[in-house]
Image: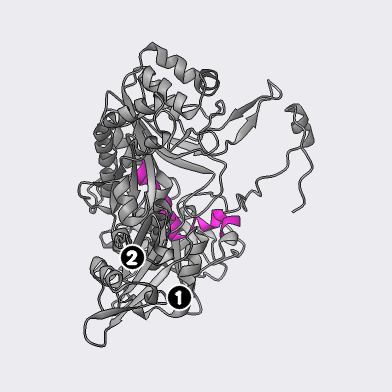
Amino acid sequence: MTDPATHQPVPRLATALRTHTCGELREEHVGSTVSICGWVSARREHSQHLAFVDLRDYTGKVQCVVDGAAELRSEYVIRVTGRVSHRLEGTVNEAMSTGAIEIKDCVVEILSQAEPPPFPLDDRTDTDEMIRLRHRYLDLRRDKMQRNLRTRAKVNSAIRSAMEGQGFLEVETPMLIASTPEGARDFVVPSRLKPGAFYALPQSPQLFKQLCMVGGIDRYYQIARCLRDEDLRADRQFEFMQLDAEMSFASQEDVLECISEAIRAVVRAVRGEEIPEIAQMTWLEAAERFGSDKPDVRFGLELIELTPVFEATEFNAFKAECIKGILVPGGAEFTRSRLDDLTDKAKRWGAKGLVWMRVKPGETGGVILDSPVAKFLSEAECSGIIATTNAAEGDLVLIVADQRPRARHVLGLIRLDIGRPPVDEGGLNFLWVVDFPLFESIDEVTGHPVSAHHPFTMPHAEDLHLIGDVAEGGDPGALLNVRSQAYDLVLNGWELGSGSVRIHRGDIQTQIFQLLGISPEEAQAKFGFLLDAFRFGPPPHAGFAFGIDRLVALLLGEENIREVIAFPKTQSGADPLTQAPTDLDPAQVAELGLRVLPRAAE
């Protein structure tokens, strides 16, 4: 049997108790006697003796005409045997895939009784998330959760097919490892056999996949579970799944093409769509145009460079390193309270303030700027703002003057606050962001640069001379101009994942460690097993990883990844279903050689 929509084989779902599933019955089954199993979704009295019972399983619902259904209750598990019939004219339900048929002459067997559920198991009723998570096993019966989890499985299957089709080998890496510095806090596991010592749960398989390259695996992939003890939010959980990949003898473009092919396969499998070639944008362009390294390119409101307009300004607030603006078409209608709210947000996000300017018609023609600061600006500056932003009557100009990174960052957040569409609007806009800085800042105390990624990221070949100059005593500030061979994949303003070409040359790695202030002894203590392996002929290699939870959520139009995870944690890190985290039994604590300090008062 073949699915007419996908032309793929349909698995045989008949079992000892059923001949068909609820949602697969169609008009071609009319006249057949079938047995189906599922949960009672609804019961509607038709007469004194007859009732319409909607029976539900994961494939959908079907209407059963039942004689003597008084004892059936919501969520009872039943088996129905009967004859598939056409519905009467005028009673077809177009909203149901099985709406043209019903099952008559039903024999009902109650397989399991059920108490009334604590919330309606339909997608029409909003239920408090804590109640849903406390009874997650019931929440999973809802159509939306069934769709989400089955889509997730489809994504995993498409990823595996795409990666294996490109010659990647699936290798499982360990879950109990030594603690490594990867930016976030580790979850740690005490060792019973070695009291006082601890394993760490992997934040990613990074070092092990590089060891696979040393081991000649050539192309590695894994759908890996990763764990990071960090604050939770809509797109972050303690536990998450990612596609993890590494390639030997490969360039950045090789990695981007292989991962792009996996993404194309996923979108094809889930949406039946073909996505165009994924565009690339440098990190610097993303920062200057969108104020973000994960730009949402579904809408405009791009940042506009206004610094040259104020080169000779007398207005002290605009005597800054960088002046950036946003043109909001029609934004002159913003109320003063909304403008004040945006100003408060800009200050909370680190700016000294936010200047707003309404564009209004001038008394003698043209347009003028209506703003509390307009009186401090020269006519040339006002004209420069209008010309540079292409402002027209009814528009709004928002301006931040500050250090360049802060001005970009704050206006980028303002841009999202004003214009970002819902996650399920505007289609799928994938984007590769490339050429990230190798270092993000210079530590004012130590004078050492701060790595923007892990310390094994390969610099751009064209920028190696800057590293050499600083190593020989040059200005450390020049290191902020060094580009890395690092790249991120962005979808609709969400960072899906990141990767880089790795350092495989010992001389470059030694130079990077020295610049970062990592002594040979410290490097050996932190990364010894990887550095030792690199003594034995590491191939040039590069890799990538992207978050599967985030990708599935975006494909389904979900704002929160909890909606695509079977058993997630709340934002506080709690599990309402199992009540984790919980206290350990004192005997277990003693066996592990641990002493638990008194808990701080909440």
Q: What residue would you read off at disc 2?
A: 326
Which of the 4 quarters of the picture holds residue 216? top left
Q: Is residue 403 visible?
A: yes
Please give the name of the residue rendered at 32% of the width and 53% of the height, measured from the top-left corner: 288
Vertically, is 349 above or below 265?
Answer: below
Q: Is residue 536 on the magenta stretch?
A: no
**Neighbours of disc 1 within 10 Å: few (<14), some (14-19), many (20+):** few
Q: What stretch is highlighted in magenta?
A: 132-156
Question: How far from the left and from the top, in percent, is residue 440?
Answer: 43, 40
Please give the name of the residue rendered at 66% of the width and 45% of the height, measured from the top-left corner: 581
Tell me the SS state at disc 2: strand
Please give the name of the residue rendered at 70% of the width and 44% of the height, measured from the top-left corner: 582
**Neighbours of disc 2 within 10 Å: few (<14), some (14-19), many (20+):** many
* Left or right: where 247 falls relative to 152: left
Q: Is residue 147 on the magenta stretch?
A: yes
Tell me the SS state at disc 1: helix
Give the number of the disc on residue 387.
none
Question: How far from the left and from the top, in percent, is residue 355?
Answer: 41, 69
Identify the colour scheme used. one colour
Which of the 4 quarters of the picture holds residue 459? top left
What secondary structure prevails in the magenta region? Answer: helix
Q: Nearer the viewer, residue 56 or 201?
A: 201
Q: What residue would you read off at disc 1?
A: 338
Q: Nearer the viewer, residue 395 or 89?
A: 395
Tell me which label, 1 or 2, sits earlier in the chain.
2
Given contact means CB atoms under 8 Å apart, are the residues at marks 1 and 2 in contact? no
Q: What residue type is labelled 2?
A: Ile
